[in-house]
Image (cartoon, grey):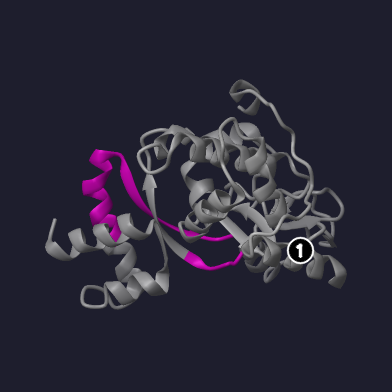
């Protein structure tokens, strides 16, 4: 492995996630375009796979941005993060993930994400929650958009096996990968990635699942102006350290019940 490859590995370990533009900028002396970046990463992966690591390329289903991710492939459990995060932070991570998975639209409000801190087994303040959430947003474990929190592309990629067991119906018909925020068919309720469906609808106008003419169902992503103001106000209050109200979360659940 040459020096430039080692430097890129250090860059990815430090950041966890980077847009492809950021990766190309960092590697500008080594690669000139996306095709060369893929080859560069492939060569690195041949070496680091021996240590159960991988650099992956993916598209975020929330922002539609392309990302380069540093991935741990050793196992498919939250415990893989214990070197980086404390026990209580790992508990918070797991509860956040579960709350999003059981929610109707696979998302929770930012206010709810902070309220979850009061349901943990050890003392963990809302300020603690804000701090670690910022790290997880930056590392693509979770995504925050319009005052909602979604599963991030790094979490979905690292925990694919677990998530497919927990959410077997959340599979994009077009790419066979997990999808938690996509576009839903009004006829059969199947869900597909927006970026997969855009390419598909360029060629035909029927649902890839039921073959009916494609009509999109409102998944609840469109909400009123008042809702946006309410959520943004709650978030602003959180940053100022004030208390706010959000959807109540279940308390006193054992670790086994969360699995």
Disc 1: CA contacts within 10 A as few (<14), some (14-19) or many (>=20) = some
Residue 205 visible, this angle: yes
Q: Is residue 76 visible?
A: no
Give the quarter of the image for residue 80.
top left
At a point 82% along the width and 58% down the height, the residue shown is 220
Residue 79 lies within the magenta run: no
Left or right of 201 on screen, residue 64:
left
> Residue sitting at 77 percent across and 66 percent down?
205
Residue at mark 1: 231
* Depth order, front residue of 257/121: 121
- Where residue 23 appears, x then y in whole percent? 35, 69
Give how far across and how far down residue 76 sits, in percent.
Answer: 46, 34
* 199 left or right, relative to 46: right
Q: Is residue 57 magenta?
A: yes
- Give the quadrant of the C terminus: top right
- Whether 195 is drawn above or below 249: the answer is below
Q: Is residue 46 above or below residue 138?
A: above
Residue 227's place in the image compared with 46, above or below, is: below
Q: Is residue 5 left or right of 37 when viewed as pictured?
A: left
Whether 114 is drawn above or below 122: the answer is below
Which quarter of the figure has residue 238? Answer: bottom right
Quadrant of the frame with the N terminus: bottom left
Asked which secondary structure carries label 1, the reply is helix
Q: Position of residue 11 (x, y in %)?
A: 29, 62
**In the figure, is residue 5 to the left or right of 220?**
left
Q: Nearer the viewer, residue 65 or 193?
A: 65
Give the residue drawn at x 32%, y 58%: 14
Q: Which residues are magenta?
A: 41-66
């Amino acid at each position: 492995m040459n020096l430039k490859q080692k430097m890129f590995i250090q860059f990815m370990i430090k950041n966890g996630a980077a847009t492809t533009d950021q990766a190309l900028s960092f590697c500008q002396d080594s690669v000139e375009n996306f095709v060369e970046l893929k080859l560069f990463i492939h060569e690195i992966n041949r070496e680091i796979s021996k240590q159960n690591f991988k650099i992956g390329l993916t598209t975020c289903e929330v922002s539609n941005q392309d990302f380069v991710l540093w991935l741990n492939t050793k196992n498919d459990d939250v415990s893989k993060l214990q070197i980086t995060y404390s026990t209580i932070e790992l508990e918070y991570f797991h509860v956040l993930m579960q709350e999003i998975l059981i929610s109707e639209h696979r998302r929770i409000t930012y206010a709810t994400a902070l309220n979850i801190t009061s349901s943990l087994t050890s003392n963990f303040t809302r300020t603690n929650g804000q701090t670690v959430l910022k790290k997880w947003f930056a590392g693509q474990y979770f995504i925050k958009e319009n005052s909602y929190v979604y599963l991030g592309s790094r979490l979905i990629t690292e925990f694919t096996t677990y998530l497919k067991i927990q959410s077997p119906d959340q599979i994009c018909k077009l790419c066979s990968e997990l999808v938690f925020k996509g576009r839903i068919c009004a006829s059969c309720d199947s869900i597909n990635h927006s970026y997969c469906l855009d390419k598909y609808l360029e060629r035909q106008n029927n649902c890839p699942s039921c073959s009916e003419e494609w009509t999109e169902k409102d998944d609840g992503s469109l909400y009123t102006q008042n809702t946006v103001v309410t959520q943004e106000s709650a978030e602003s209050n959180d940053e100022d350290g004030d208390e706010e109200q959000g959807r109540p979360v279940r308390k006193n659940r054992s670790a086994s019940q969360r699995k």
